[in-house]
Image (spheres, rainbow, N blue to C red):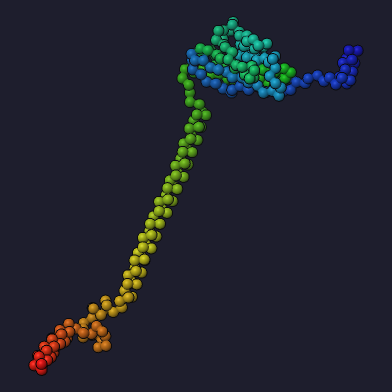
Amino acid sequence: MLTVLALASVVLLGIVPEQSQAITIYTGWERHALVGSDIRLSCSFFSWRWTSDDVTFSWTYRPDGSRDSISIFHYTGGEAYVDNKGPFRDRVEFVGNPGRRDGSILIKNLDFNDNGTFTCDAKNPPDIVGRPSSVRLLVFEKLPIQAGVITGAIIGVVLGLLVLIVVIYYLMRFLVARRVFSLSVSKHGKKKKEGSQQRQASFLPFSSSSSSLPPSLLPSSSPFSFSRQPTQQINLLSSSDVKSKMTSFLKRY
C-alpha cells in the first residue's frame, strides 16, 4: 500500500528522488621519502555535484607483504578522527580542505616499517559510487634517482644538442653569406676601377702610344712627329732672323 502511494506521489506531484552519480578519486601513484622525514599524501575527488556538507574521507593502510588493511583516518560531519592505537599513533595529521575536495593527510617521522599502500576513499552525497584510489609509499635511507629524473635529463640533453646544432647551422649560413657579399663588393669595385681607367685612356688615344715610339717611326703628318733637336734648330733660326731684322730696321732708320 505504501509503495503504491509513493508511486502515486511521484506521478502526481512530480517528485523524483535525487539520483547519485559516479565520483572519481585521485591520489598519487608512488611516493618516496627519507627515514625520519614527513610526507603529505594527497587525495581529491571529482563530482558533478556541489561539495556536500556530508562529504567524507577515509584512509586505510596495508603494509608490504600483508593482505589485511587497517583504518588510520576518517573525516565525517566536519570532524577528523585519527587512529591512536595503530602503527601511526600520534603521527597522522589531517591537512586537507574538504570544502575544496581535498582530503590529504600528513604522516610524520617515517620509518622503514611504514612502507606499504595507502588507500583513500571519498563520498560526496548523493554521489557515493566511486572506486578508491591508492598510493604506494617507499621509505629509503637515501633517495634513489627516479626513472623520471633520468628520462628528463636525457630529454634535456637531446634538446640542448638540437638547439646547439640549429645555432651552429644558422651561424655558418651567416658567415658564408657575409663572405659572398664581401667578395661580390670587392669584385664590383675592381671592375668599376678598371672601367674608369679605360675611359680615361680613351680620351688620350695617342699620348701613351706615341710617347713610346721613336721619332723616326712616327708618321710625317702626325702632330707628334717633331723631335727635340729640330725644335731647337727652329728656335735658333728664329732668334737669328729676329736679330738680323732688328739690325736692318735700325740701319734703315
What is the total number of numbered labels drawn onto the structure image?
0
Left-right relation of 73 to 16: left
| Residue at figure coordinates x 68%, y 11% from the top left | 77
Q: Is residue 62 visible?
A: no
Q: Position of residue 59 (x, y in %)?
A: 62, 14
Residue that sits furthest to the top in the current view:
85
| Residue at figure coordinates x 68%, y 21% from the top left | 131
Left-right relation of 63 to 125: left
Q: Quadrant of the C terminus?
A: bottom left
The vertical placement of 234 against 52, above or below, is below
Q: Position of residue 124 (x, y in %)?
A: 70, 18
Viewer-closest of 146 and 59: 59
| Residue at figure coordinates x 38%, y 63% from the top left | 188
Q: Quadrant of the N terminus?
A: top right
Q: Position of residue 101 (x, y in %)?
A: 64, 19
Viewer-closest of 54 and 193: 193
Residue that sits furthest to the bottom in the current view:
252
Q: Is residue 163 visible?
A: yes
Identify the image quadrant of residue 91: top right
The vertical placement of 92 against 134, above or below, is above
Viewer-closest of 221 and 54: 221
| Residue at figure coordinates x 34%, y 69% from the top left | 196
Left-right relation of 124 to 253: right
The vertical placement of 74 against 180, above or below, is above
The vertical placement of 66 against 159, above or below, is above
Q: Position of residue 177 (x, y in %)?
A: 42, 54
Residue that sits furthest to the front in the current view:
253
